[in-house]
Image: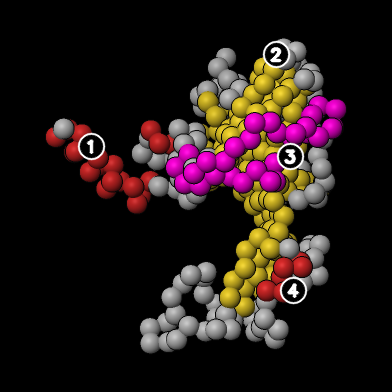
């Protein structure tokens, strides 16, 4: 017991230095399978530790599953618990399935420049003309923002969180041409520890140069640091990753521009996250 208490105190002391921001992810039970009647279970969560569900579940209304032939497949046996969601994917075609959680909404703030829930300045009363909205539609924005709101800022947010599952031989992954997304140079289900893989990041179907990409190996719960790697896309939007050891990896990137599709928005925020598996040689 004394040893356990000492270890617990040491871990608690280390938390402020090692804990990372919340990360959203989709993790399949298998990324490479084979057969005519194959099912794969996928976990979906937002957590502090990769890939340990310790915060909140991912809501499943944005889940899109694309089969190798381009058709849409419905998630099966879906359920949402306190810290994670789960669903099954039936892989009745040969090739690569794209499993994604796609979000597209607006956020707005007006009045005092304070974060949501932040207290007013000492001695000041809360400003009834200030507010913040997250993940709303254009219609909701029009009804929830007060008329004549000062310092109104509206941002369009488009995010994609995804993973890939291949039944049999891999097949090409087609880009949607919308927002920030990954395009294969190396197929995402053809990754092996000790080898380098190359991918391309695109924005609205065009290569995105100079974009920082964060790569984190999973199981951060069992080490004192994230041990993350950061790489930058080249002029062709390409970047390389060397997989140090087998396991699940989390990669992410984000960018902003003013190419909004909603007239009320003046800025667009794009984000991309993928869970990839490097297999042993």
Give the image location of residue 15, x and y in percent. Answer: 34, 47
Dot 3 falls on a residue whose secondary structure is: strand
* Front-most of residues 45 and 209: 45
Residue 98 is inside the magenta segment: no
Instruction: Give the class, few, some or many, for how many residues have Cα within 10 Å of label 1's Cα (few <14, many ≥20).
Output: few
Q: Earlier in the sequence, mark 3 or mark 1?
A: 1
Residue bearing mark 4: 142
Mark 4 touches mark 2? (CB < 8 Å):
no
Residue at label 3? 64
Quadrant of the image occupied by residue 94: top right
Q: Residue at x 72, y 74 (%)?
A: 143
- Crowding around mark 4 (Cα neighbors within 10 Å: few <14, some 14 to 19, many 20+) is few
- Left or right of residue 26, residue 206 in this image: right
Mark 1 vs mark 2: give the one in front: 2
Comparing 117 with 20, the one in front is: 117
The range drawn in magenta is 53-82
Which is closer to the viewer, label 1 or label 4? 4
**Where is residue 114 shown, x and y percent of the image?**
51, 74
Q: Earlier in the sequence, mark 4 or mark 2?
A: 2
Q: Quadrant of the N terminus?
A: top left
User: Residues under labels 1 and 2: Cα distance?
Assistant: 43 Å
């Amino acid at each position: 017991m004394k040893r356990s208490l000492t270890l617990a105190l040491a871990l608690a002391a280390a938390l402020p230095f090692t804990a990372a921001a919340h990360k959203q992810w989709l993790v399949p039970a298998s990324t490479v399978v084979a057969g005519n009647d194959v099912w794969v279970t996928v976990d979906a969560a937002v957590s502090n530790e990769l890939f340990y569900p310790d915060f909140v579940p991912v809501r499943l209304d944005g889940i899109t599953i694309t089969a190798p032939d381009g058709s849409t497949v419905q998630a099966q046996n879906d359920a949402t618990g306190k810290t994670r969601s789960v669903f099954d994917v039936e892989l009745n075609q040969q090739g690569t399935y794209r499993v994604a959680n796609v979000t597209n909404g607006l956020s707005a703030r007006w009045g005092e420049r304070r974060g949501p829930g932040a207290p007013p300045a000492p001695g000041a009363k809360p400003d009834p003309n200030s507010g913040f909205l997250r993940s709303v539609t254009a219609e909701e924005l029009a009804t929830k923002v007060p008329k004549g709101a000062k310092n109104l800022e509206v941002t369009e947010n488009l995010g994609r969180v995804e993973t890939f599952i291949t039944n049999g031989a891999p097949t090409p992954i087609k880009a949607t041409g919308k927002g920030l997304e990954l395009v294969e140079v190396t197929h995402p289900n053809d990754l092996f520890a000790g080898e380098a893989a190359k991918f391309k990041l695109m924005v609205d179907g065009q290569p995105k140069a100079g974009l920082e990409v964060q790569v984190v190996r999973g199981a951060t719960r069992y080490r004192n640091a994230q041990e993350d790697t950061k790489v930058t896309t080249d002029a062709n939007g390409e970047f390389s990753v060397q997989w140090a050891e087998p396991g699940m990896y989390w990669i992410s990137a984000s960018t902003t521009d003013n190419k909004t599709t909603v007239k009320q928005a003046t800025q667009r925020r794009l984000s991309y996250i993928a869970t990839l598996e490097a297999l042993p040689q």
